[in-house]
Image: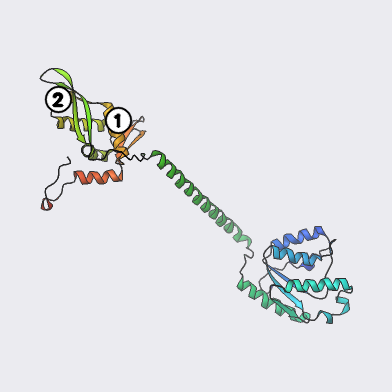
Amino acid sequence: MEANCIPAGMELFPAADEEQLAFIKRVIDDCDYYLLIIGGRYGSVDESGVSYTEREYDYAVEKGLKVIVLLHENPDEIPLGKSEKEPAARQKLQKFRDKVSTGRLVKFWKNPAELPGLVSINLSRVMNASPAIGWVRADKAANVEVLSEINDVRKENERLLRAVGAYQAQVSKLTSPPALDDLAGLDEDTRLSGKYWNNSSHDERDWTVKTPWRKVFAYISPYLLQRPSAASVKEVLLAALFAEARLDGELRNASLDDQDFQTVGVQLKALGLVNVDYTQTTSGGMGLFWTFTPKGERLMTELRAVRSSSQGVHKNPS
């Protein structure tokens, strides 16, 4: 007690049967250290001939408790009244002494007056070398419980974050464009077509423009800053292509083939330049909206930003 420890003395619980031993094991489970003092007696034995004290010791070792062993230095000098009289019991006591002395440091004592000092010194040493949990005051128990719950939540949060990361990786694989070895590059041409009303002949005609994919993206990319709808992107692209074609007609009477426009979306997405998402509109409905990727934003800046005249002439997106 003076060493700020709470003893659970086995002398308070005589190990006389299996039921009592089970209770003592629960007491050992609550302990941080195990102090064994061996004198001249082996103690009560079970049906197999092993003393309950030895079984307690074996259990403490099995539980990983730090063990302090104090052995009587000269057991033959102990008075007969405090020693084992039977040769068989004395032999078991000697084997037990040999057992506890193997693989650990032990201290020897001659008379009971030495024990308080030996216990205090050795207990202090083992507590400093191997600090244990100890006991918690009742008014601190709630705080410890809360800390334990917080730690559990932290661990669960880390587990969920790992799971989310794994799911995001799987979603990315499913939503990212396929790797195509023969995917047309930005500098390759594509043909886009539609219809318009010819002012001279007063009839509807087809129009076709051959233009590189880089130019197609250059036409629409600045408008993607506003996260436009697919219909708005189609109008912007139609206006640019109609002007490029220089047709004898008016834009309001022209159209862009929808299949060609869908191919534009697929191609630019496959090139990693745009995202086309089906999301909710401001009116509560659903629709397709275009945005550019970080790669697309960089290319837009490269294509549409104005260079300094001192470093050369600005190159047209075409």
Residue 115, picture quadrant: bottom right
Estimate the x, y position of residue 78 in percent, counting from the top left: 84, 80
Which quarter of the rendered picture does the N terminus lie within? bottom right
Q: Which residue is mark 1?
A: 262
Single out the mark in the foreground, 2 or 1: 1
Residue placed furthest toward the top: 202
Which quarter of the rendered picture does the C terminus lie within? top left
Mark 2 Cα shell of 10 Å, populated few (<14), some (14-19), many (≥20)? few
Q: Amino acid at mark 2?
A: Glu
- Give me the residue at 13% from left, 53% from top: 311
Estimate the x, y position of residue 214 in percent, counting from the top left: 22, 40
What is the count of numbered marks?
2
Most foreground residue, 218 or 120: 218
Most foreground residue, 103 or 150: 103
Q: Amino acid at mark 1?
A: Gln
Q: Which residue is mark 2?
A: 250
Classify mark 1: helix, strand or loop: helix
Most foreground residue, 270 or 188: 188
Give the mark nearer the N terminus: 2 vs 1: 2
**Contact between labelled residues 1 and 2, with CB atoms less than 8 Å apart:** no
Relative to 240, say whether 8 is above or below: below
- Left/right placement of residue 209 relative to residue 106 reads left
Relative to 184, say whether 158 is above or below: below
Classify mark 2: helix, strand or loop: loop
